[in-house]
Image: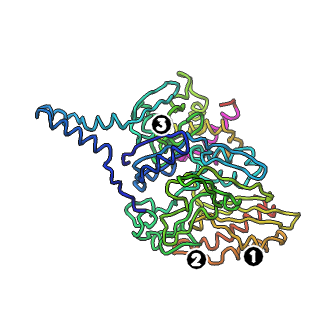
Amino acid sequence: MAKEKSSKESRRNFLKKSTLITVAAMAPPAALKAAEEQWDERLAAAIENVPLQVEVNGSMHQVKIDPRVTLLGFLREHLHLTGTKKGCDYGQCGACTVHVDGKRVNSCLTLAVMNDGRKVTTIEGLANGKDLHPMQAAFIKHDGLQCGYCTPGQIMSAVACIRDGHAGTDEEIREFMSGNICRCGAYPNIVAAIKEVKGGSGV
Amino acid sequence: MKQFQYVRPAEAEAAVNALVKDPGARFVAGGTNLLDLMKRGVEAPDRLVDINRLPLKEIRKEKQEFHIGALALNSAVAEHRDIREGLPLLSQALLAGASAQLRNMATVGGNLLQRTRCPYFYDTAMPCNKRVPGSGCGALKGFNRMHAIFGASEHCIAVNPSDMNVALAALDATVHLSGPKGRRSIPVQDFHRLPGDHPEQDTVIEKNELITGVSIPRSPLKHVHYLKVRDRNSYAFALVSVAAALDLDGKLIRGARLAMGGVAHKPWRLTEAENFLIGKEISASSFQEASNLAMRGARAYEHNEFKLRLAPRSIVHALSIASGLVKA
C-alpha cells in the first residue's frame, strides 16, 4: 500500500530547526561550536529517547534509549555484553538467543524498550563465577562446536530446551533446537551434550 | 530503520486512540514479523504502539468454546493443557510453525496478521503489488516455487505463511476485533482475503482496528492431524500443509474438516472434499477421491507444478494419519 505521507513535520526536524534558530541568534563562533558538537542531534535524541529499566544477569539498568535499538543491540553496544552474537539479524539463525523472564527469545527481533521491567539472562549470566554451567561444560566435553559463533545461542537454547521439558528423545531435541543453526555442523555433538545434561540433573 | 515514536498504552481504548491519531502508526506485539519488515524498509511506521501491556493474554475453556486472547503467545497456546486436550489440531499446527524462540515471542493476533514470505514482497528493489500497488508482480514470471496454486490473481500469487491460520480455518474459529466504531466478530474464513485487485490487503481488518482474540467452538472431531511438508524437517515455511479433522463412528465418517496451507493467499478450506467424505468409510480410495475433488481449479506456475501432485498426496496422507489408517 502506498504510504500516506504525514503532512505534519516530524518532531525531530522541528526540534532541529528550532535549535538552529537559537544557534543563528548566537555570535558566529558560538554557532560554529554548536554545529560542531551537533547539539541539534543531541537535543532531539535526549527528548525522543525512551526510558528503559531492565535487569540483565542480576544487575538493574536504567537508561534512556533510542526506541529503534533492538535488545541485541542494547546488550552488545550499550552494555558491552558481546557474548550474545548477531548472526542473521532476522530471527533465522538463533545466534542472538537470550532468556527473557526465563523464556528463550531472539534478541534481534525485539526492541530493547519492549523489554521494560523484564529480566534478561545472557550467556555471560549462566556461569556461577568461575564454575561453568553444566551445559557449558557439556558442550566442551562433547565438542559441541567448531568455530563457536553460534555456541552462546545454542547453549542458551539448550538450557531452555531441557527446562521446557523438550529433551526427551534425540528427535525431540533436534525439533526443539531447530531455531539454532550451526554452519559447522556440530549437531550430533550438541544433541549429545544436551542429553548428558538432561540425564544428569535439572537445569 | 527509520525513526519512529514509541508509545506503550495499558488499555485497548488508549491503544486504538494512539493509532487513530497517526495514519503512519502500527501496533506491535511480538514484533517478529514487523521488526523484520522495518529492518528491510518494507514497513516504516511513524509511530509504534506497543500493545504488550493490554490484558489480552488469557486462554479460557468455556462450555461451548475456547477463547484465546490476541496477546497469548504461540508457545503458551500450543503447550496449554486445555488446548492440547481439546484442540490438538491447533496445538500441532502451532508447534509446526517457526522455532521455539519465535513461538515464545509471536502472538495469536500477530500470527493472524502475518505477512506473506514471498521474496518479492521483502525485496524493495523488486516489483510487488502487495508492497507497492501498481508496481507489478515479480513472482508471476519470476521464481515462484513457493507460490499459490489456488485463488491467485494476475496481481499477486503470494501465499499466507501461517500454520496456525490453517488450523483455525479448519476449526471454524471466529476473530474478535475492536475499533473506533466498536466491536465486531468475523469467521476466520472471511477474515483473510484473496488477492484480487487489492493484494495489499491481506485481511478485512479495518484501519485502526485491534484484534482482541479468537474463539474456537469445542469440536466433536477428535481424529486430527496437521501435516506440514517443507524443504527441511523443521523451521521452514510450508510447501503444502494440511489440517485434517474427522468425527468417526467406527470406520464411518460422520464429520470432516479440511484446510490447506502454502497453496493460497488465505487458508484454503476444502469444503467439497469435506462434503464428499461425510457418510463414507475410511479408506485409501475415499481419501483419494476426496483429494481429487479438492484439487479442482488448481493452477500452477513455472516452478510450483510439483504442488499439483504434492497437495493431493498430502491430503490423503493427513486423512490417513488422522483416521488411524496409517501411523504417523
**Circle 1 — which element?**
helix
Q: CA distance from mark 3 to mark 1?
A: 53 Å
Q: Circle 2 is placed at which residue position?
A: B299
Which residue in the rendered view is the most extreme toward the top? A129
Nearer the viewer's eye, disc 2 or disc 3?
2
Q: Main secondary structure of the magenta part?
A: helix
Q: Position of residue A147 (x, y in %)?
A: 48, 41
Instruction: Give the extent of the magenta segment.
Output: A175-199
Q: Earlier in the sequence, mark 2 or mark 1?
A: 1
Residue B234 seen by the camera: no
Which residue in the rendered view is the most extreme toward the left? A28
- Both marks 2 and 1 on one chain: yes
Q: CA distance from mark 2 to mark 3?
A: 46 Å
Q: Residue at x 52, y 74 (%)?
A: B153
Which residue in the rendered view is the most extreme toward the right? B250
Q: Circle 1 is placed at which residue position?
A: B289
Q: Position of residue B143 (x, y in %)?
A: 47, 69
Q: Residue at x 55, y 51 (%)?
A: B210
Q: Nearest the camera: B78 or A142?
A: B78
Drawn side of residue B159 relative to residue B246, left or right: left
Tell me if residue A116 comes above or below residue B32 in the rendering: above
Q: CA distance from mark 2 to mark 1?
A: 19 Å
Q: Circle 3 is placed at which residue position?
A: A84
- Whether A45 is among the magenta residues is no
Q: Residue at x 51, y 45 (%)?
A: B15
